[in-house]
Image (spheres, coloured by chain):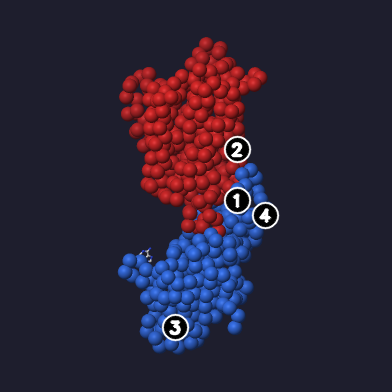
Amino acid sequence: MTSRARPLVLGLGLVALAAVPPVGGLLNQPFYVDLVRRVMIFAIAALSLDLILGYGGMVSFGHAAYLGIGAYAVGILAHHGIHNGVLQWSLAIAASMAVALVIGAVSIRTSGVYFIMITLAFTQMLYYLGISIEEYGGDDGMRLAVRSQFPGPLDLQNGTVFYYVVLAILLLFLVLAHRLIAARFGMVIRAARSNEARTRAIGFSPYRYKLMAFTLAGAMCGLAGALLVNHTEYLTPEFMHWTRSGEIMFMVILGGMGTLVGPVLGAFAFLLLENLLSGWTAHWQIIFGPLLILVVLYAKRGLFGLLPGGGPRDG
Amino acid sequence: MAEALLQVRGLTRRFGGLVATDRLDLDIGQGETHAIIGPNGAGKTTLIAQLAGDLRSDAGAVRFAGEDITRLSAPARSLRGLARSFQITSIFPDFTTLDNVALAVQAHAGHSFRFWRPARREPALREPARAILAQVGLAGRADVRAASLAHGEQRQLEIAMALATGPRLLLLDEPVAGMGLDESQRMIRFLASVKGRLTIVLVEHDMDAVFALADRISVLVYGRIIATGTPEAIRANAEVRQAYLGEDAVA
Ligand SMILES: Nc1ncnc2c1ncn2[C@@H]1O[C@H](COP(=O)(O)OP(=O)(O)OP(=O)(O)O)[C@@H](O)[C@H]1O
Ligand SMILES: [Mg+2]
C-alpha cells in the first residue's frame, strides 16, 4: 500500500481547487471558476451516491430526486420571498432527508433489479410532479431571482465567494464521509454490501443501518441540489430527470466506487469531457458510452485506481 | 431433568413438494455436543438454517434457553446466543481476517449508530477479536485479506466469527469439510477444547470428527431423525448402518 503517496495527491488536488479562482482571474477566464464550481456540486452529489452505492451496495437509480428536492426547496422559498439561506438550505436538507427516508423504507426491503426500479419509479413521480406544478414554473422551470442570502461576508452573489463555499462544503462532506465509513456504522453497511447473510448471522439487522445511510445520502445530495439551483440561478424539473440519476452514477463508477476521492474525480472527468466534447460534436454522448465500458472492464476501481495509493478494495 | 437448552418440536420445512425437514423433534442439553449425521440431501443444512433463523419454518416450534424463538430473525437469535457457521464458507472477503472477527464482536457490543470514531482503532473490538484468532490458530494471519486465506484458514475464520459472538449454542455445518488431514485434526482438537463449555450442534460427514467429539448422535434421513443415541449405540444400530454408515465405518 502506497499510503504515503495518498496525502500528497490529496494535498495537491486541494491546492489546485483552491487556486482556481485566482488563476481564473489572472487569465481572465471566469468561465473556469463556473465550471469547476459546477463540478464540485456534482462531486457532492456523486459522493453521496457513492456512500450508498459503493459502500452500501444499494444501486439507487433515482439519486437525482434529492438534487431536485433540494433545488425546489430553495426555489419555492425564494418564489415566496424567503431568501434566507439558513432557512432555505435547512429546508433543502430536511425535505430530502424525509423523502429519502420514505423511499428508502420501501426500497431497502427489496434488492437487485427491484431496488433499482423502485428508486427510479419514485424519482419519476417527483419529476412529473415538478413538471405539473405550474405555480413553480412547471415544465419550463423558473428563474431564481437572488441566490440564498447569508449574513456577513458570505455573499453568494459574488461568484468567488460562492466557489469557496462550495469547496468548503465538499471538503466537509469528504471528512464526514471519511470518518463515517471507518466508524462502526460504516463497517456495518460495508459488511452488509459484502455479505448480507453473514452480517445477519453475526447479529446485525442491516435494514436500519442501510436506511440510515440512504437517508444521510439523501440529505447530502439535497444540499447539493440547493447549491445547484444557486449555481444555475434557474429551477427546472430537469434536475430530477432520470438521465441525471444516470449521470451521477456514471461519475461514481468512472471515478471509482467505494472510494471517497473517486466520485470527485468522476465528476471532474465527466463534466470536463462533456464540456470538451460537446463543443466538438453534438453527439458527444456516443463517446461516453464506450468510455464507461472501458473503465468498467479495465479499471475496476475507476480513475481512483489509477492514482498512486489507489489500492484494492478495503472492505 | 432440567429443560434442554434447545428444544425443537414438530419442525417442518417444505421446498415445493419436497419435505426437507419433516416434523422433527430434537432436544439438546446444556453443554452437550450433539452430532447430526445423514446422507447428502438429508436436510442437515436446512435444519441448521431453520435453527439459526435464516430459513422460515412451515410448522413447528423452537425454544432456546426457555424462550420461544420460532418467529425471531437470525440477528435476534444471534443476540440471544445462537451462532452458526456455514457449510459453504461465508466471510467478508475484502476485509482483513481481524476485521471479520471484530465485526462479529461489534455486532454484540451495542448498537452501531456510531459515526466518528474509527472502528479499527477501538481496542474493545480489536482485542477480543485478536484473542479469538489466537485461539483458532489464525493470529499470524490477522492482517491478511480474508479472500487470500487458504481454504482451511477460511474454515477456521468461520468458527472464529461464530465464537466472537459469545454464543451459548454453536451450530456448525461441516466445519472440517474440504480440509486436509492435518487441518481437520487441528480443528477437531480445537473443538474438543471448547466442548463442554459451549453447547454444540455438529453437522459433519467426517466420522473421525463425529466420534471424537459427539456426546450423542442423531441420524437424519429425509428430514426425519431415525435414531438418536450415544456414539456406541449409533455404531451398533443396524438401521443406521443400512441407511448411512456403511460397513467400513463400523469396523
Ligand atoms: N433453497 C432450496 N430450494 C429448494 N430445495 C432445497 C433448497 N435447499 C435445500 N433444498 C433441498 O432440500 C433437501 C435437503 O437439503 P440440505 O442442503 O438441507 O441437505 P444436507 O443434508 O445439508 O446435504 P449435504 O450433506 O449435501 O450438505 C435437498 O433435497 C435439497 O435439494
Ligand atoms: Mg449441507
Based on the displayed image, in which of its 4 quarters is residue A177 positioned?
top right
| Left or right: B189 in relation to B8 | right
Give the amino acid at mark 3.
Answer: Ala
Of the numbered discs 3 and 4, the one sitting upstream in the chain is: 4
In depth, the one of B227 and A278 nearer the eye is B227
Q: CA distance from mark 4 to mark 2?
A: 23 Å
Residue plotted at (44% across, 64% down): B56
Amino acid type indicated by mark 2? Leu
- Distance (Cα) linking label 2 and label 1: 16 Å
- Per the rendering, the colour in which chain B appears is blue
Q: Is residue B76 visible?
A: yes
> Where does residue A233 sit, x and y in percent of width and height?
48, 20
| Residue position marked by numbered label 2 in the rendering | A176
Q: CA distance from mark 1 to mark 4?
A: 13 Å
Image coords of residue B224 (percent x, y): 41, 77
Ligand 1 in which quarter: bottom left
- Callout 4: chain: B
List the residue tagged with mark 4: B124
Q: CA distance from mark 3 to mark 1?
A: 44 Å
Q: Amino acid at mark 1?
A: Ser
Judge depth for marks 3 and 4 and give the one in front.
3
Circle 1 residue? B112
**Three-letter code, disc 4:** Ala
Quadrant containing the N terminus of chain A is top right
Residue receiving disc 3: B227
Which of labels 1 and 4 is toward the front?
1
